[in-house]
Image (spheres, coloured by chain):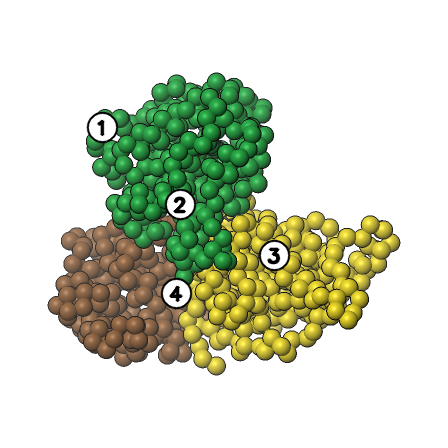
Chain colours: A yellow, B green, C brown
Amino acid sequence: MERQLMTGNEAMAEAALRAGCRAYFGYPITPQNELLEYMARRMPQVGGAFVQAESEVAAINMCYGAAAAGVRVMTSSSSPGVSLKMEGISYMAGADLPVVVVNVARGGPGLGNIAPAQGDYFQATKGGGHGDYRMIVLAPSTVNEAAALTQLAFDLADKYRVPAMVLADGMLGQMMEPVELPPFVDVGSLPPKPWALSGAQGREPNYVASFALDPYDLRELNRRRLARYQQIEAHEVRWEEVQTEDAEVLLVAYGTMGRIAKTVVRLARAEGTRAGLLRPITLWPFPYGPIRRLAQRIPVVLTVELSMGQMVEDVRLAVEGRAQTPFYGEMGGVVPTPRDILQEVKAHALQRGKHEAGVRPA
Amino acid sequence: MRSSVENMKPVFVRPKSLSDKKFTYCPGCHHGLITRILAQVIDELGIQERTVMVAPVGCAVFAYEWFRCDGVQAAHGRAAAVATGIKRVRPDLVVISYQGDGDLAAIGLAETIHAANRGEKISVIFVNNQIYGMTGGQMAPTTLVGQHATSCPEGRNPQEAGYPIRMAELLATLEAPVYVARLALFDPKHVLETTKAVRKALTYQVQGKGYSFVEILANCPTGWRMSPVQANKHIAAVVTKAFPLGEFVDKG
Amino acid sequence: MERSVVFAGFGGQGVLLAGKVLARAAMDLGLHVTWLPSYGPEMRGGTANCTVVVSTDPVGSPIVDAPDVLLAMNGPSLDKFEGRVTPGGVIVVNSSLVPRAVTRKDVGEVRLAANDLARELGEPRAANMAALGAIVWAIGTVPLEAVKAAMRGELGAKIGEKAAQANEAALEQGFALGQKTNLGT
Ligand SMILES: Cc1ncc(C[n+]2csc(CCOP(=O)(O)OP(=O)(O)O)c2C)c(N)n1
């Protein structure tokens, strides 16, 4: 496959088209604008629908319509705009509609700034919209992976009839890296969607709704949804491990922090500290099991995030007290250098060493 | 940058309602001129100490800091609702909502229309530059037919994107507003007329009369890829055809 | 081996493109590379810059606090970034537009009259490629031939053969000037 240089925003857009996405609705917001602009240019070339909506609320509801009509559909935004999409995401979860939402996240809360940040983890993974639902959340750490995970998001959303989010950040959106784009799928070969609104010709009418007045009816719908969520948890957990075999300090980091942490592992090992990395690729479903397994033998599990500490709560749930679980975070769009984190890793390794020396019988 | 307009008359001595914060606008941008006009009128009416500026999300996002008045920054499109909240609890304050076309006419259209329809006693300054300046030049609801923008690279196609929304005319169909006008800034005469309209709008608010809306046809040299001089010519020759100037409502 | 470069200038000087050509050359050589532009409202203040990181290993952070090499195409860029260059690094200064010299003593300076050089080649728009030539010399790990090929890949079809040759010559002359410069380090 040919390698080309693309920004993350462009790569996600092109990957979506290649995955069979034929409808895109968006609203401008930095640092995601290039994705919308790419779709404005390219979507008409593949015969799909593009609308610059009047707001993110409108955009996600256009997605609701297109998804109900059975088309692979995507929207993209950045943190403040994704907040506005949350209502629509809840409705789509409630109507069992597949959609791909890209969040090129930025510094927050509020208007914040346009620098890369990971403050939207809770919103993405813990139900940013109302009600009892789950959303698949994929976290790329390179432009190449952003393209691959965008395509995966479409497949998973369709397979399980759930919203799926690609959670990137401003850095991934704006930077260029070599990409190997996936091939075009033949839209006609995608699995059929018999539930879609296509006109009740020769069949009973289809209804798409998130409404069930009778509590027993809604319970039944939610039970079926829960069963699908359990399938996702059982089969779709994805993560990457780097030099965890002999690690004395395990870093856990995703997305942009995940790639920086890889450099930290290399630097730490060059200086004699056996660091390893577990990089969650799916943030929901979260790799609780893999982290738990590693925590059984690695004494320090250090979570690193571009936030006050959000994913660290899931890491601590996974570790369940089996290891120390310190946290290192940067905020406000500031991205730490590998050296900053290396200091932290070495400090924990050192402390651990002292501790062990202390308990050893004289 | 000092505009030629500025050099013509000593009208533009630095208003005391203007803060020391440096503008972040591009050279030649009308936002700067409108800010000065507003500050000047606030000075004239002697209301600096009871004015609250509601800033939008857009190039004017710092409008709350450019005046020596209290200021608040609203979420994208919600300035009219924020202004409503302030005015309802402090009717003695002069509340000015300052918004761009994406902010006011796209994402904030519901808030805009309903604040006007309720006759909120606020003044809305609407900067219509026919583009999303802040985010890098995407199509706005006011973008002219055929005008190029980064999200309509072939030019605005009315078959898909509709036609430019005439906000002043739209709001003029409502019963409640007391003042609705559209002005421009492409020459000194029009700058003076805009100043007069802003004065009227704020005066009506001070008198407790009701909702006022001042739409100003502004430039965006960066987003339009024109020099400030070219942009002024374009407004005079082209933009005013799509957006006729005038006072549509004046119940003062 | 990892080398980072900040390309800085004002909008229209082609610094983003110069960075992209280097990134493409690195990609074609099978190296790891990232290209990160300044973005958002800051890009409309009239200045533009991008950071390119070229490495034999996957690039951790494309954001670089202390670049190995800086290209300052105009005065404000030198003022803004001079202090950030890593000690022992190199600053390529476009002396056509920047009269002042680098004040730091712990970095090397290459003074290159990029605009004059390009004008003499009959292609004023090639100033960025002249500067890139000197950058390629300064980072030392990407062969000039690969950069020439990348330039053609990036620009060739758009600008025509004559302009492509002028850009090639600009790359060569910038590189040669770097070779001739005594950095005193
Ligand atoms: C919910 C939300 N969506 C999108 C944005 C991004 N955004 C910032 S300014 C802006 C539009 C600016 O255009 P306009 O209102 O016309 O004002 P101008 O910048 O032209 O003065 C947008 C879409 C945001 N901040 N919040």
Residue A217 at x, y percent in the picture: 85, 55
| Location of residue A197 by image quarter | bottom right
Q: Which of marks 2 and 3 is in front?
A: 2
What's the CA distance linking mark 3 and mark 4? 34 Å
Q: In this view, does C93 lie to the left or right of B183?
A: left
What's the CA distance linking mark 4 and mark 2? 42 Å
Q: Does the residue labelled 2 lie within 8 Å of ligand 1?
A: no
Residue depicted at 65% across the width and 53% down the height: A88
Neighbours of disc 2 within 10 Å: few (<14), some (14-19), many (20+): some
* Picture disc at residue A62: 3
Disc 4 marks a residue whose amino acid type is: Trp
Residue farthest to the right?
A216
Residue farthest to the left?
C120
Q: Which of C68 and B202 is in front in this view?
A: B202
Q: Is residue C76 visible?
A: yes
What's the CA distance linking mark 2 and mark 1? 30 Å
Q: Which of A62 and B62 is in front in this view?
A: A62
Callouts 2 and 3 on one subunit? no
Residue depicted at 33% across the width and 73% down the height: C154
What's the CA distance linking mark 2 and mark 3? 29 Å
Disc 3 to disc 4: CB gap under 8 Å: no
Q: Residue under circle 4?
A: C35
Q: Nearer the viewer, residue C180 or C131?
A: C131
Residue farthest to the bottom?
A1
Q: Quadrant of the C terminus of chain A?
A: bottom right
Q: Residue under circle 1?
A: B9
Chain letter for mark 1, please. B
Q: Which of marks 2 and 1 is nearer the N terminus?
A: 1
